[in-house]
Amino acid sequence: MRPSLPFFLSLCLAAAIAVCGRPAAAQTAALPSPAASSLDRVIPAQYGVPLSPPPPAWDPYAAQAGQAFPATPPAANWVPAQASSAIGGQPGYPGYSTAQPSIMPTQNPAGAPTSLFPPGYPSQNSTFQQTMRLYQGARGSWAYLFGSGQGTSVAVNELDTTATFAVPFFHNSQANLNHAPLLITPGFGLQLWNGPETTPSMQADLPPNTYDVFIDTAWNPQFTPLFGAELGLRVGIFTNWDVFVWESWRLMGRAIGTLQLTPTMQGKAGIVYLDRNLVKILPAVGVTWTPDANSRYDIFFPAPKASKRFTTFGKHAVWGFLAGEYGGGAWTFRRSTGQISPFDYNDVRVTLGTEFVPQTPTGLAGSFEVGYVFARQLFFVDGPPQYQNLDNTLMLRLGLAY
């Protein structure tokens, strides 16, 4: 069922009641990931996480999971190699692994962090301690997929921007040990398409541009020292504005359970609902492993990521990463024949990148990625053609958050 206007108004009313009904007490808060195209931006990524999402990562959320500033500081005898930093998205998906910080007691052997997410790395659902503020921050990203616009060599410009707000939500509940707030993220996205070339024998066509206007909600509670969850919902309009029909509305979300397997490993399992025409739902399963203060491995489908901290620069940690994601989205438009048609654009992306993240609760964060994009496909609900394969290509992506 497509979301309706009453549903949207009910969601806004519930958020307003939550703000008015709870005091602005000190609690943990985290900023969701940017509205990157990866996983339809339904993967969470919190503040300071890589901007690519993710997880990202998965954007309502990117992944809505993010920067690592654990509420429990590292033990006094923990001396990192160069600076206090540690593990690692998109959602982000956006880049996407939204691992919660460990709240299990540890023996803290020499050289080991006291939690799953030591300070200084974008640890996807990590949180930092601060006084609750309504406005949490803003993110933006730009990606370019190379193409000539001739034949099936399609170029795409993707631009996204989001702002995140946090309100108390079951703040004093025993089922919310980490006092996770409700994160509300309005966002806007623009895609500029160049190609494919339409001929009598190849009738696939695309509009020159499409738009995303959406609002995300995300909640990442820790129910017990062992069990937690990453929950998110996104409702929005996805069209080129030449047409506005029921198919222009989309409802996306995620429901992922987390289990603390060891002080440095967290298991995850759940689903991501994409609400595309060809692919409605994906399983989400894997583990996040942080063997030391300078490494993080999200062995996680559909957004794997391996990250390593190289150095520090001023008050920022510099990380390198290798990541994968399921990119694309779904929109409605009026075809060259005059017919109104929903369509999907799907691809798989493998990226190599670097990111700088602040080692303080606030600050400027950024990322730069290069990637290879393959398995590119257009799917037209009302063909012809119903399927159109596109040429593989390269991608550049930049992101900033503050």
Image: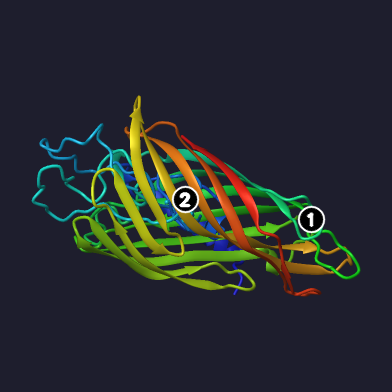
From mark 1 to mark 2, how far is it between C-alphas? 35 Å
Note whether 356 is above or below 207 in the view shown.
Answer: above
Taking the view exactly as shown, the residue that stands out farthest to the right is 200
Note whether 25 is above or below 209 in the view shown.
Answer: above
Note whether 281 is above or below 345 in the view shown.
Answer: below
- Tally the marks: 2
Looking at the image, residue 10 sits to the left or right of residue 173; the answer is right
Q: What sort of colour scheme is used for the picture?
A: rainbow
Q: Splitting the image into 4 quarters, where does residue 205 fall? A: bottom right
**How busy is the neighbourhood of tag 1: few (under 14 within 10 Å), some, or many (20 plus)?**
many
Residue on which the image places disc 2: 184
Circle 2 SS class: strand
Image location of residue 176, percent across then percent down: 26, 58
Residue on which the image places disc 1: 195
Residue drawn at 36 percent across, 61 percent down: 299
Looking at the image, residue 294 sits to the left or right of residue 148; the answer is left
Q: Quadrant of the N terminus?
A: bottom right
Circle 1 SS class: loop
Q: Splitting the image into 4 quarters, where does residue 254 fall? A: bottom left
Q: Amino acid at mark 2?
A: Ile
Image location of residue 340, percent across then percent down: 80, 68
Residue drawn at 52 percent across, 44 percent down: 369
Image location of residue 285, percent across then percent down: 38, 69
Q: Amino acid at mark 1?
A: Gly
Image location of residue 5, percent across then percent down: 62, 63
Q: Splitting the image into 4 quarters, where does residue 354 fall? A: top left
Label 1 or label 2, whichever comes before in sequence order: 2
Q: Between residues 2 and 8, which one lies in front from this camera angle? A: 2
